[in-house]
Amino acid sequence: MSLPELRKLAKVHALDASLREIRARLSQLDGGRRLQEQIEKIRTDHAATLEKTSRLTGEQRELESQNQATEAKIKKFEAELYSGKVVNPREIAAIEKEIAALKRQREAADERLLELMEEVPPAKAASKVVEDAIACREAQLAEYRAKEGPAREKLQAEYQKRIEMRPTLLAQIDPSLVQKYETICKANHGIGLSVVEAGRCGCGVQIPARTMAAAQEGKVVVCQGCHRIIYAPEGVV
């Protein structure tokens, strides 16, 4: 084997490293899953606060609507009572009884509405803190998703471009060296070559001088630590 062959293999190694990096970056594009989980956690952790506000405001709306209906009924009965059309004492008594019952109902509702006037504002304030936190995360999620699509497309295009370069580079290298490299890659998490720096393999193992000399001559030698092919460019000591 020759050093030029190892130089070519080093290009494949660099290409493979860039492909791994792109795959890692693509795996981080999760559709905003982390932000969505944060939103759901806020909702879960503060469900009681949100439920209380919803319950109190719902009760307030219902009582206000009920009072409007009650007031309309009272006016209707009073108009009937004072119209002069009802003269039968029993009918008059029945209408007056109905008006009295409606007024008691209105008074009870008014009392509860006064209580709600004290309870609703702090409940709404507490819920607003939660809702603002959710709105903030949702805005971040929308922004993330708007950016993620183009970013994913760009990375996928770059990945495809580089993956198509690989066969061309491999075709320029001795088949036996390619086979050895691919075999080592399969056994070492996709990394089949290690560039020596300051006399050390990328895994940190000190390369013996005899092994270093052989690598610099273009011989195919492997690191005794990580078992990857050693690439030692000229001038490395």
Image (cartoon, rainbow, N blue to C red):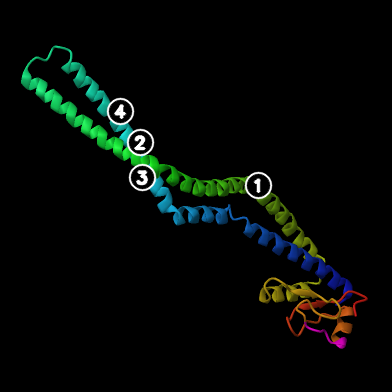
Asked whether, in this view, residue 133 is left or right of residue 162, the answer is left
Identify the residue shown where x is 77% and y is 68%: 13
Q: Which residue is mark 3?
A: 55
Q: Is residue 40 above or below residue 228?
A: above
Q: Which residue is mark 2?
A: 61
Specify the segment rendered in magenta.
205-210
Residue 34 drawn in magenta: no
Q: Secondary structure at mark 1?
A: helix
The residues tagged by marks 1 and 3 sit, at their Cα atoms, a distance apart of 38 Å
Residues 102 and 230: in front is: 102
Earlier-in-chain disc, 4 versus 2: 2
Earlier-in-chain disc, 4 versus 1: 4
The residues tagged by marks 4 and 1 sit, at their Cα atoms, a distance apart of 50 Å
Identify the residue shown where x is 33% and y is 38%: 113
Earlier-in-chain disc, 3 versus 4: 3
The residues tagged by marks 4 and 2 sit, at their Cα atoms, a distance apart of 11 Å
Percent from the top left, x then y, of residue 96? 14, 24
